[in-house]
Amino acid sequence: MKNFFKILIIAILLLILIYVSNITTIPRNIILFEGEKLNLMTVFGIKLTQKENNDIKQVSTSVGNNLINTSKNIGHANLEVSLFNTITVKELTVDVIPKTKVVPIGKTIGLKLYTKGVLVVGMSEVTGENADEQPYLDTGIEEGDTILSINEKEISSTEDLIKTVNESKGKNLKIEYSSKGEIKVANIKPSKSSKGEYKLGLWVRDAAAGVGTITFYEPSTKSFAALGHGIQDIDTGNLITISSGEIVTASIVDITKGKKGVPR
């Protein structure tokens, strides 16, 4: 009798393990192409039922082999995984996207990237008619910060910055800038250089260039994907916040072996 109970307990635990393992293997999110079918192998008693108000109208289920038949529907469906149609043990979503074809490329491309605002990459004194001045002192602006606007006018390029500062004629400017993810405001009075130009004493950059590998091209939308990673500014070492960019032709003329922790 004792052996019987031991065997019974082991059998029950094994059965529980089978059900738990099967439920665990069912994903919470499923993405299918239009017309694609997905078979979810389940044990007896585990069923899929579709909730109401879904974009996908056709979902059929069968004992032991739950079949999600998406037909030609594109959209989103919510389903419940239940045990013996009584206890809901999991919820999952099915997203059906249009079929698409892509063209694999794998070729090197050049990238020209434009920053959001202008990146401060250095500081220097402004050589004036009588003395050298440092207008940026005590403003809180540091290398690696990004100037976003001046007097509430968006700054998107180095040319914008130069023009705005020159038009100030030396009057105090309100600068909004980003520093380590935090938006700050500073007031700065430009200095007049020996050449009659007004300057802040800040070296800035609004673009970066590099190379990447274009992975694939999608003809119908003319979109593409390229392999890449975060881009660090060569002077500050900080990651650049990108606003826009463009692809240019490129060719490999030299290869430098990479080092651990130093992306190239």
Image (spheres, rainbow, N blue to C red):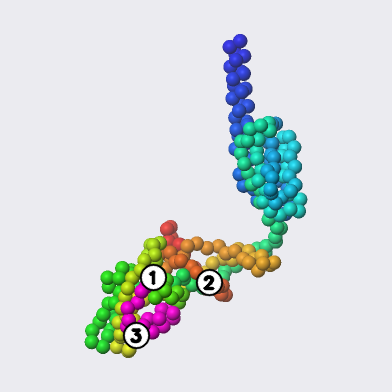
Disc 2: which residue: 245
Q: What is the number of the mark on residue 258? A: none
Label located before the other in sequence (2 or 1): 1
Tell me the magenta residue range. 158-176
Q: Residues within 10 Å of mark 1 (few under 14, many from 20)?
A: many
Q: Nearer the viewer, residue 227 or 33?
A: 33
Label located before the other in sequence (3 or 2): 3
Q: Quarter holding the N terminus?
A: top right
Label located before the other in sequence (3 or 1): 3
Looking at the picture, does residue 30 appear above or below residue 223?
A: above
Q: Nearer the viewer, residue 3 or 60?
A: 60
Q: Residues within 10 Å of mark 3 (few under 14, many from 20)?
A: some
What residue is drawn where x is 49% and y is 72%? 114
**Whether label 2 touches label 1, CB < 8 Å:** no
Disc 3: which residue: 169
- The Cα–Cα distance between marks 2 and 1, rounded to whole angstroms, is 23 Å
- The Cα–Cα distance between marks 3 and 1, rounded to whole angstroms, is 19 Å
Instruction: Residue 230: give x, y in percent of width and height.
Output: 47, 62
Residue 260: image quadrant is bottom left
What residue is drawn where x is 69% and y is 45%? 52
Q: Nearer the viewer, residue 184 or 260?
A: 184
Instruction: Residue 187: give x, y in percent of width and height.
Output: 32, 73
Disc 1: which residue: 176
Give the amino acid type for the residue marked by disc 3 in the picture: Lys
Element assignment for label 1: strand
